[in-house]
Image (cartoon, rainbow, N blue to C red):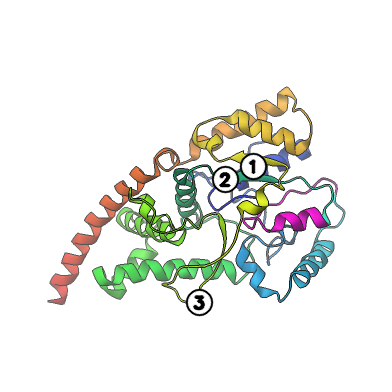
Amino acid sequence: MFGPGSGGNFIAGLLNKLIKKEYTALDISIGGSSHTVFPNRYANGDSLSFGKIADEQVEFTTQIERENYYIQAINEEYTNIEFPQVTWTHDFTNIPVYKKYFKNCRILTITHDSYASRLSSVYMHVTKFFFNLDLIVPIKEPHRSNSLKNWEHRCKTELIPYVGADKANDIFNTRTSKQYANDIITYLSLRSMARYYGLLDYSQGLPLSEPCRYDFALYKNKLYNQFPLVGVNYSEYIDRSDAILSYSYLIDNRPILLINSVEKILERSLSAQEKEFILTEYIAYRQCQNHDILTDPISYYRNMEKKALIHLLKLKKDYSDVAS
């Protein structure tokens, strides 16, 4: 269990390797993402998770209908199982569902103890989810596509007053090939996602003027420019986890906290070989993270804002000159 950007894919991949005694390196991208750890075996998402995001619940009229759907899918997809299975989700309301159907399941939850930690995760989510072309996310359609379309719409809407619709399209489409476009789209994405989670004020060094929404179930608002619909507070479910790991383990570089959590999940002491494997993979994973985001997300945002606004003001001048 983990909020977007909190590195749960890395830990899920780590546990999967430990369970199978496969001490080979995890697939970690240059940008620090582990979203390629699990192959997307099923075109319509990973049924074992009972849904990766809260928004997937709106497809069902009742909770029992939802549970029956996933149980049937699991029985069809997971056959001839040789090892305990590892899955992940952003939807903390699945914790009691797992406990209901999988009596021997073990749940590790990643939590946050500060707004800075939450903001780091939000910005990690932006750089890993929206800018990684090799991303594998087993989220049911149309939720994944809708998320990307909404992001594109928000970015272009912000750009059009500066450069017009045609240039806005060009900037968005060249975000991974041209540095100026990358700077602009990164800044707009950081701003948009901070606003989405109620952390925009904090990102600008101001007191929060609205509740932080990062720890809540969020559902899509049909209006592009509106805040998400807010559901239950996920903190109500965390205590039912078998191990709780603060994201500060990664921020403060304390891998012993990760090792302790893994031992709780596996319900045994780790061997020297296993601890060495975890530490090796942890070091590799942390080295690939954006350390500016990890350690000082507010300064990172300010620097990206400064760079993007220089580009945007020049583009706006050029656009105005052409228009006149």
Residue 84 lies in the magenta stretch: yes
Tell me the residue at 67%/31% (across/down). 260
In the displayed structure, does residue 158 sit left or right of residue 128?
left
Cα distance, mark 1 to mark 3?
33 Å
Name the element at disc 1. helix
Residue 16 location, x and y as percent?
A: 72, 43
Q: Are marks 1 and 2 in contact (CB under 8 Å)?
A: yes
Q: Residues within 10 Å of mark 1 (few under 14, many from 20)?
A: many
Cα distance, mark 1 to mark 2?
7 Å
Image height of 242 relative to 278, above or below: below
Cα distance, mark 2 to mark 3?
29 Å
Image height of 264 relative to 228, above or below: above
Image height of 288 relative to 61, above or below: above
- Residue 245 is drawn in which quadrant? top right
Amino acid of disc 3: Lys
* Quadrant placement of the C terminus: bottom left
Front residue of 66 and 143: 66
- Residue 136 is drawn in which quadrant? bottom right
Amino acid of disc 1: Ile
Name the element at disc 2. loop
- Res. 7 mark: 2
